[in-house]
Amino acid sequence: MSTAHRPTLRGTCAHLNPEELSAALGKLRSENAKEQATHKKAEEDEEDEQFFNYMKSEREKGEARMMAEEEVARKKAKEDEEDNCFLKFMLSEMTKGEARMMAEEEAARKKAQDDEEDERFLNFIQSMMTNRL
């Protein structure tokens, strides 16, 4: 298509005077600027929405991570408390065992002493009986 058959702005608006042309051009520029601003605002709103969703996702991940860390800490504290109770129990049992062993040793020593005294007494009685006969 040649340029001779296409309408031009000059040909289409030839009936308008320069002030009207200037006003029409200004109106077109204003509408174009509004349209671009609206488009830019829509793009910014979309970017803001994407950023908001990203931050929300990161916050949720952070909260989940914190909850998991708190749960691990609670379990660790519970295990530490159980270990501490077990160690106290074992220490108590060892102390009881040591006390029992000491009592058994004392009883064995006393029994040995009593047996020795009994043997001496029997020897004494035997010697007295032997001397009487």
Image: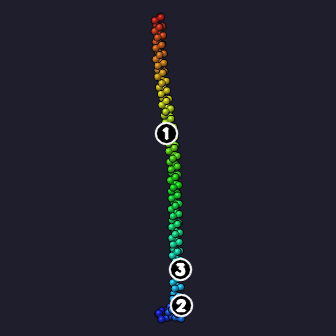
| Residue 34: assigned label | 3
Q: Measured from the top left, where is residue 119 in percent x and y? A: 47, 15
| Residue 87: assigned label | 1
The coloring applied to the image is rainbow
Q: Disc 3 residue type?
A: Lys
Q: Which of 85 and 133 is in front in this view?
A: 85
Q: Which residue is drawn at 51% across and 37% down?
A: 89
User: Real-space Cα distance between discs 1 and 2?
Assistant: 98 Å
CB contact under 8 Å: marks 3 and 2: no
The reply to whether residue 12 is visible in this rendering is no
In the depicted structure, whether residue 29 falls above or below residue 72: below
Q: Disc 2 residue type?
A: Glu
Q: Number of labelled discs?
A: 3
In the depicted structure, whether residue 93 falls above or below residue 113: below
Q: Mark 2 points at which residue?
A: 20
**Element at badge 2?**
helix
**Element at badge 3?**
helix
Q: Measured from the top left, where is residue 29 in percent x and y? A: 51, 84
Nearest-to-viewer mark from 1 and 3: 3
Q: Which of 87 and 14 is in front in this view?
A: 14
**Sequence order check, earlier mark of 1 and 2:** 2
Q: Residue at x 49, y 33 (%)?
A: 95
Q: Measured from the top left, where is residue 45 in percent x and y? A: 53, 72
**Callout 2: 10 Å neighbours few (<14), some, many (20+)?**
few
